[in-house]
Image (cartoon, grey):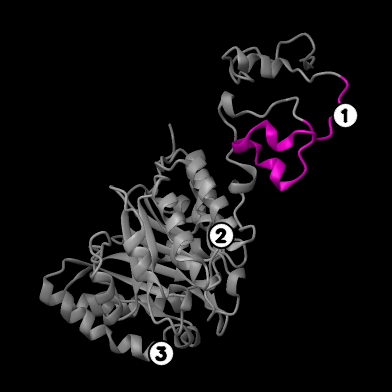
């Protein structure tokens, strides 16, 4: 019986998280070309950029042109980040194709690294708390039945250090009590790790604590950066810790590029590479609906646009070749370079002229079996266990 995981959804953030740390002179035409390519991959939720001040984020100065020139695809939800009312109004002028009201329930949220928040949005933790009564009052006026709690930097921040789970839980407890006093049920929790402090064991500890304290919380959102290379492992831990009663929303970027100039890591921050996550999910038996080939080609396009290799792995080595048609040629020459490794999409021309030291063609009874439609190994059968050449215990 196959393992059942939480319900899963995903948002591609490359056009925002990725581009906001790249050269501000990348052309509108290139950004539109990439956005259109992403629209063809099967990804269902794409953030196209940010309606923010060009003074702080010059990379987003020409957002209006991008929205006007890209080609929306039916079935894809396009959104944009807006940090204030002015940004929301700019975005609203392009709805559709942009979706402005995501339909998410109201949520209280607090950044635990106050210094980062001051650098990032020019707002203190105190400013954020001051807005809570308004959020609660609006939820009551609207008759909202379910709400959320949340924390930014729940496992630590570059300007404040490691944050114990007890602190994060106390902050969430405060938010939960305020919603309780308002008579509104808390069913959601969002955790945003802007500076990449996530570690699988710490994330699991946090989730277990939250589920033990509030089992009615079943709607989860996670924003994981990859500064220490742990985002994909953390993503797996989240899916492995929560149950089929839960729903999980993750986000990431093609190639894993991205970061924030206010956090201290710049481009080194990175995010969970979309193609790596989608490949892992498919291997876990979770249907993503994503065309990995098109997704990888979008990564390659992005690398050409930004002028350097990105941080993902599946875009370099390819998905695991699980089907017969995708298995590697036993008689390919040496494959040594990154360009040669692209043969999983570009074909044999990628390694033409490579070193070939073998004097005879390589054959194998295992590959022969696969070519005949048989399994390479029979776990409950005779092959290769009863073959004449296979070692057999005396007892």
Q: Which corner quadrant holds the C terminus?
A: top right
Secondary structure beneath dot 1 equals: loop
- Does residue 307 appear in this view? yes
- Report x, y in % for residue 305: 56, 59
Left or right of 90, for residue 152: right
Q: Where residue 119 appears, x then y in whole percent? A: 48, 86
Mark identifier at residue 357? 1
Q: Examine the rendering and report whether any part of residue 212 can be seen.
A: no
Separation of residues labelled 3 and 2 (CA atoms): 36 Å
Image point (55%, 27%), residue name: 323
Residue 321 vertical position relative to residue 143 in the rendered view, above or below? above
Tell me how far mark 1 sits from mark 3, CA to CA.
64 Å
The residues tagged by marks 2 and 1 sit, at their Cα atoms, a distance apart of 37 Å
Quarter holding the N terminus?
top left
The magenta-colored residue range is: 333-359
Looking at the image, is mark 1 or mark 3 earlier in the sequence?
A: 3
Q: Which residue is mark 3?
A: 124
SS category of the residue bearing label 2: helix
Q: Where on the picture, by quarter, is residue 122?
A: bottom left
Q: Answer whether residue 338 is magenta in the image.
A: yes
Q: Nearer the viewer, mark 3 or mark 2?
A: 2
- For marks 3 and 2, the one nearer the N-term is 3
Observer-nearest of 90 and 190: 90
User: Which residue corresponds to mark 2?
Assistant: 305
């Amino acid at each position: 019986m196959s393992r059942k995981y939480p319900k899963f959804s995903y948002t591609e953030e490359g056009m925002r998280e990725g581009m906001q740390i790249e050269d501000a002179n990348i052309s509108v035409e290139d950004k539109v070309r990439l956005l259109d390519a992403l629209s063809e991959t099967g990804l269902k939720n794409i953030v196209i950029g940010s309606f923010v001040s060009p003074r702080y984020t010059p990379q987003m100065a020409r957002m209006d042109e991008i929205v006007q020139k890209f080609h929306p695809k039916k079935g894809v939800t396009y959104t944009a980040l807006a940090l204030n009312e002015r940004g929301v109004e700019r975005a609203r002028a392009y709805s559709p194709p942009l979706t402005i009201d995501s339909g998410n329930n109201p949520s209280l949220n607090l950044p635990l690294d106050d210094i980062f928040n001051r650098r990032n949005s020019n707002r203190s933790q105190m400013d954020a708390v001051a807005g809570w009564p308004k959020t609660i009052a609006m939820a009551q006026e609207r008759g909202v039945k379910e709400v959320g709690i949340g924390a930014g930097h729940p496992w630590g921040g570059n300007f404040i250090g490691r944050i114990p789970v007890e602190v994060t839980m106390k902050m969430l407890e405060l938010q939960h009590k305020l919603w309780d006093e308002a008579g509104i049920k808390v069913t959601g929790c969002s955790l945003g790790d802007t500076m990449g402090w996530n570690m699988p064991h710490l994330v699991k500890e946090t989730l277990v604590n939250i589920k033990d304290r509030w089992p009615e919380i079943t709607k989860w959102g996670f924003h994981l950066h990859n500064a220490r290379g742990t985002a994909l492992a953390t993503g797996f831990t989240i899916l492995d810790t929560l149950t089929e009663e839960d729903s999980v929303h993750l986000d990431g970027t093609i190639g894993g590029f991205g970061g924030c100039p206010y956090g201290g890591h710049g481009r080194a921050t990175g995010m969970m590479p979309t193609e790596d996550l989608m490949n892992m999910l498919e291997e876990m038996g979770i249907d993503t609906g994503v065309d990995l080939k098109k997704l990888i080609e979008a990564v390659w396009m992005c690398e050409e646009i930004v002028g350097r290799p990105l941080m993902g792995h599946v875009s370099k080595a390819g998905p695991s070749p699980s089907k017969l048609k995708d298995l590697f040629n036993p008689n390919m020459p040496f494959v040594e370079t990154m360009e040669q490794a692209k043969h999983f999409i570009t074909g044999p021309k990628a390694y033409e002229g490579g070193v070939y030291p073998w004097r005879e063609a390589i054959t194998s009874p295992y590959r022969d079996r696969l070519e005949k439609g048989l399994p390479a190994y029979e776990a409950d059968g005779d092959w290769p266990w009863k073959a004449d050449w296979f070692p057999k215990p005396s007892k």
